Image (spheres, rainbow, N blue to C red):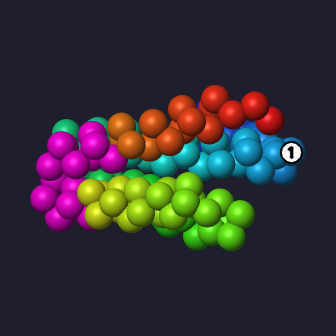
Amino acid sequence: MNAMTALRQYQKVNTGAQVHDASPHRLIQMLLEGALDRLAKARGAIDREQMALKGEMLGKSMAIVMGLQQALDHEQGGEVAGNLSALYDYIIERLMDVSRNNQLAPLDEAVQLLRTIKSGWDGIEH
């Protein structure tokens, strides 16, 4: 087993342990971190003209955002949940624009919106 394979295996085990022990609040933070990480990789792939990697990273980011959207509790969350849902829709639209046009402006906008959402979660006492 080479060093990179060993590192990936460790990261999978470490992430799995973190998920198992995480509170719902921490899980949301981890999902947002994961989406932002994949968007950074998508940006790098665009810069290097690695379109397959760009598509993979954008797809994974969109899946995370859709998962966050589906997890919203509209009954308890009321207007906040509705606003977050609309914002998630908008982020997905922007990422679709990136996928079609390889433009960085919509990617940067999606990243900024996700960072803003994450900073809100990071500021919540739990």
Residue at 63% in and 68% down:
74
Residue 31 is situated, as x and y percent measured from the top left of the image, at 60, 49
Tell whether 13 sits left or right of 37.
right
Q: Residue furthest right?
A: 21
Q: Secondary structure at mark 1?
A: helix
Q: Is residue 71 above or below residue 115?
A: below
- Crowding at mark 1 (Cα within 10 Å: few <14, some 14-19, many 20+): few
Q: Amino acid at mark 1?
A: Asp
Residue 37 is situated, as x and y percent measured from the top left of the image, at 47, 40
Residue at 51% in and 64% down:
82
Q: Quadrant of residue 30?
A: top right
The residue where tag 1 is placed is 21
Q: Is residue 82 above or below residue 9?
A: below
Q: Pick the residue in front: 114 or 40.
A: 114
Q: Quadrant of the N terminus?
A: top right
Is most of the magenta stretch helix, strand or loop?
A: helix
| Viewer can see residue 109 | yes
Q: Residue furthest front?
A: 79
Q: Is residue 91 above or below residue 29?
A: below
Residue 106 in magenta stretch: yes
Tell whether 19 sits left or right of 67.
right
Residue 121 is situated, as x and y percent measured from the top left of the image, at 62, 38
Q: Pick the residue in front: 125 or 103.
A: 125
Residue at 33% in and 47% down:
110
Q: Which residues are magenta?
A: 96-110
Q: Quadrant of the C terminus?
A: top right
Tell whether 51 sits left or right of 36.
left
Q: Quadrant of residue 41?
A: top left
Q: Pick the residue in front: 39 or 7.
A: 39
| Viewer can see residue 71 | no
